[in-house]
Amino acid sequence: LVNKNNIAELKLEQEGFKIVIRSIENDNGSTDAPQVVTMMTPPAAAMPAVMPTAPTPAAPAAPAVDVSTPSPSPAADHNAGLLEVKSPMIGTFYRAPGPDKDPFVSIGSQINVGDTLCMVEAMKLFNDIESEVSGKVVKIMVEDATPVEFDQVLFVVDPNA
């Protein structure tokens, strides 16, 4: 239907369910078979996707990987006011839409509500993870092409920047 009617993208959202069908142009200018992205999310009350960060405990349960440029560790009070963008599902985290493509966002990127931040692949379906906040990406907490868990912090965002 997408190819026959020359539609670039079709989105359908209902409570707890989102599907996106998108035509992808390949290197020679023709379009490949449509890419289908399906995402089921629990009700908002059960899973907040963005939470304010708390001060870092003295002994964290699991170390996070910071893919930013190495810099001195900020004091716990510098985390005040920052927001965490968490994974809504279990899967594999991808920073870019393809291996030879630029990342959706990088450290220092200004983001707006609805911007695609990354993709999480679950059971051969690529799910766009969209921002629910506006601000500046200050940390990327996951390495590209690595597994992520439900509710794992993916990005730290400064909403005041």
Image (cartoon, helix red, strand yellow):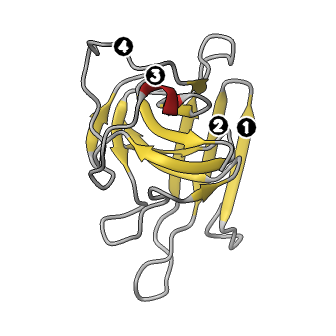
Relative placement, left or right, of 124 versus 131 is left
Estimate the spatial distance between the alpha carbons at disc 1 and disc 2, rounded to whole Å. 4 Å
Discs 4/2, front: 4
| Residue at 48% across, 47% down | 138
Residue bearing the label numbered 2: 18
Q: Amino acid at mark 1?
A: Glu
Do labels 1 and 2 touch, CB within 8 Å?
yes
- Which residue of the protein is positioned furthest toward the bottom in this rendering? 28
Compare marks 1 and 3 and give the one earlier in the sequence.
Answer: 1
Please provide percent x and percent y for residue 27.
Answer: 40, 84
| Residue at 30% across, 44% down | 72
SS for tag 3?
Answer: loop
| Residue at 46% across, 22% down | 151
Relative to 69, is 31 above or below? below
Please provide percent x and percent y for residue 133.
Answer: 68, 40
Q: Amino acid at mark 4?
A: Pro
Q: Pointer 2: residues within 10 angstroms few (<14), some, or many (20+)? A: some
Q: Is residue 104 visible?
A: yes
Residue bearing the label numbered 1: 13
| Residue at 59% across, 42% down | 158
Residue bearing the label numbered 3: 151
- The quadrant in which residue 82 appears is top right
Q: Amino acid at mark 2?
A: Lys
Residue bearing the label numbered 4: 57
Assign the N terminus to one quadrant of the image.
Answer: bottom right
Discs 4/1, front: 4
Q: Pointer 1: residues within 10 angstroms few (<14), some, or many (20+)? A: few
Do labels 4 and 2 touch, CB within 8 Å?
no
